[in-house]
Amino acid sequence: MAVGEETVTHPGVVRKVEGDKAEISVISKASCVSCSLNNICSVSDMKEKIIEVDRAELGRYSEGENVVVEMKQSYGTWAVLLGYFFPFLVLFLGLMLFLHWGLDQGLAGILAIALLVPYYGLLYLLRGFFKKRFRYHIQ
C-alpha cells in the first residue's frame, strides 16, 4: 500500500470484466508478511479482496493484467466513522438516555444495542448512495 498526498493505492489484478463492471483482485497484507520470520510467526496475514470498478475506469486493461487501484484517503476516514464511531455514539447516547429515564440497566443495555438495528438498516438502504460516493479509480 502506498499513501500519496490525498490517495491510497494498492496493486491489483483484473479478475473479471462483465458488462459495465470489472472486478479487481487486491491482496491485503499485514505489515509482518514481509518480515523474514513470517513462517514462524502466526500473526502474518494475507487476504484477497475483490474491488468493483466501472469498466470505463479500466481503460485499456483486460483480464489478467496488473493495475494500480486508487482511492481518496478521506473515504477511509468516512468508512471508519460510519462503521465504528457513529454506532458507538448511538449505543452510548442511547444507553445514557435509557438510564436517565430510569430503566433497569439490563433493559437499557438491550435497548441501546437494539438501536443499532435501525442504524445499520439505514446504512444498508443507503448502500447505493455509498457505492456511488466511495469510488475506486485505476491509475
Image (cartoon, rainbow, N blue to C red):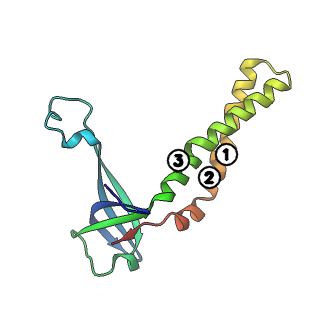
126 in relation to 47, above or below: below
Query: N-terminal of the two: label 1 or label 3?
Result: 3
Residue 10, percent across and down? Answer: 31, 59
Q: Amino acid at mark 3?
A: Val
| In-image side of 15 versus 21 (left or right) | left
Q: Amino acid at mark 2?
A: Leu
Q: What residue is pinned by disc 1? A: 119
Tell me the number on the disc at residue 123.
2
Residue 73, percent across and down? Answer: 46, 58
The residue most toward the right is 101
In terms of depth relative to the viewer, which is nearer, 87 or 121? 87
Under circle 1, the secondary element is helix
Under circle 3, the secondary element is helix
| In-image side of 32 versus 8 (left or right) | left
Quarter of image, res 57: bottom left
Name the residue: 34% across, 76% down. Answer: 58
Q: Report the mark closest to the observer, 1 or 3.
A: 3
60 in relation to 47, above or below: below
Name the residue: 30% across, 66% down. Answer: 68
Q: Report the mark closest to the observer, 2 or 3.
A: 3
The answer to whether mark 1 and mark 2 are in CB contact below 8 A is yes
The answer to whether mark 1 and mark 3 are in CB contact below 8 A is no
Name the residue: 59% across, 49% down. Answer: 82
Name the residue: 22% across, 41% down. Answer: 33
In terms of depth relative to the viewer, which is nearer, 138 or 4? 4
Tell me the number on the disc at residue 80.
3
